Image: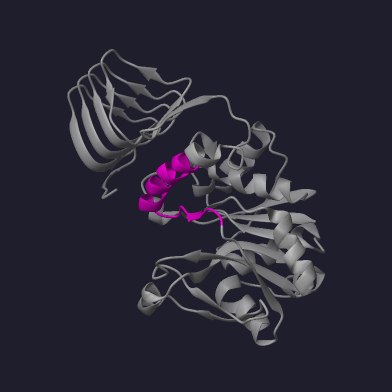
Amino acid sequence: MDAIILAGGLGTRLYPLTLSTPKSLLPFLDRAIIEYQIDIACEAGCERIVAASGHMSEMISEYALCTDLGIECVQEDSPLGTGGAIANVIRDKGLRGPLLALNGDILCDIAPRSLVATAEALGTPATITAAPVEDATAYGTLEIDKTGMLKAFREKDAAAKHEKRSMINAGIYYLDQRAVKRLACTEGAFSMETDFFPALAEEGAVGVHIHNGFWRDIGTLELYFKTHFDILGYFLMMGAANFGGKRGDFALFKDFIYLHNQTVLGAECDLYHRVVLMKGAEVGEKSHLRNCILLPGARIGKGCKLETVIVDTGYTVPDGANISNKVLSPAHEEPFGG
């Protein structure tokens, strides 16, 4: 089995963090987002992992080589959509299936072999992972029959907010040789969600694997921010094994304070609830941080007060600054609600 990771998006909803870094390489608790998808592919036993890249693809290729992640990259010359990107990789690499396909902006503690087992039991060309959410207004929902087959995709609908356990597309798919062959024959830009899967569903050819564990979309600034603290809560209850293995490079405290062991803390600085300091981040003496995330190498001067702030790599907050509800990046500053 092989794996394709969709890593080609512009990441506009994560601006300004993605003005100089592709979305898949944004650091999340000191690991690039793409590495969490690589973990799933490796756990599934995939022999070959290919990143479908587009925006800033050179950076993704360079990162893969420098970090020895063992992945290949295929660049799209123009935006192809989720389906077109997968089909492009299939043709470029001559893949025959089965395949594991993963969206590049999710965090999930799925046991991928359970997805494969469901797919083999159902015998369908394609199997979608579904995740239950309390409020599905930001997502399209799945209509699933009693036999575990996908009946239809439903577009984003405010009425879904009032339904209990709405099932949404979790962005992890198993595609057997039949689905892969069909994708290989489909050229141009198209969507897995609005084109490929609905057409297959009409033929009764899409199964559904329900994942009841941890699942988060991190494709917006608000979700990127919130999910850091959701994951820290997961770590405190479940341990870190499902998100990064046996890491020994950070400390975690019960008031949701995460410190990489290469952070620098000045005398009498105050980290008051929900603070993430990634590798090389520095906080000056007598500075007070609450509800903040500092990306690798971010610096806070002396005597600062920050609340609900994300500080990007390469940004230095001057001494004495009092800042709230902002994303601070060398390229741009953006209001932020947290």
From the top left corner, tell me how far across and down residue 235 is, in percent.
51, 38
Residue 124 lies in what quarter of the image? Answer: bottom right
Q: Does the magenta stretch include residue 233?
A: yes
Q: Residue at x 20, y 35 (%)?
A: 323
Depth order, front residue of 315/223: 223
Residue 130 lies in what quarter of the image? Answer: bottom right
Q: Would residue 189 be visible to someone looking at this image? A: no
Q: Residue at x 63, y 57 (%)?
A: 102
As drawn, which residue projects farthest toward the bottom?
A: 202
Q: What stretch is highlighted in magenta?
A: 213-234
Q: Residue at x 23, y 25 (%)?
A: 318
Q: Is residue 249 magenta?
A: no
Image side of residue 15 versus residue 190, left or right:
left
In this rendering, is residue 253 above or below 10? above
Main SS of the magenta part reads helix
In this rendering, is residue 225 above or below 198? above
From the top left corner, tell me how far across and down residue 193 is, in percent.
57, 73
As drawn, which residue projects farthest toward the front?
A: 237
From the top left corner, tell me how far across and down residue 293 is, in percent.
36, 36
Image side of residue 178 versus residue 75, left or right:
right
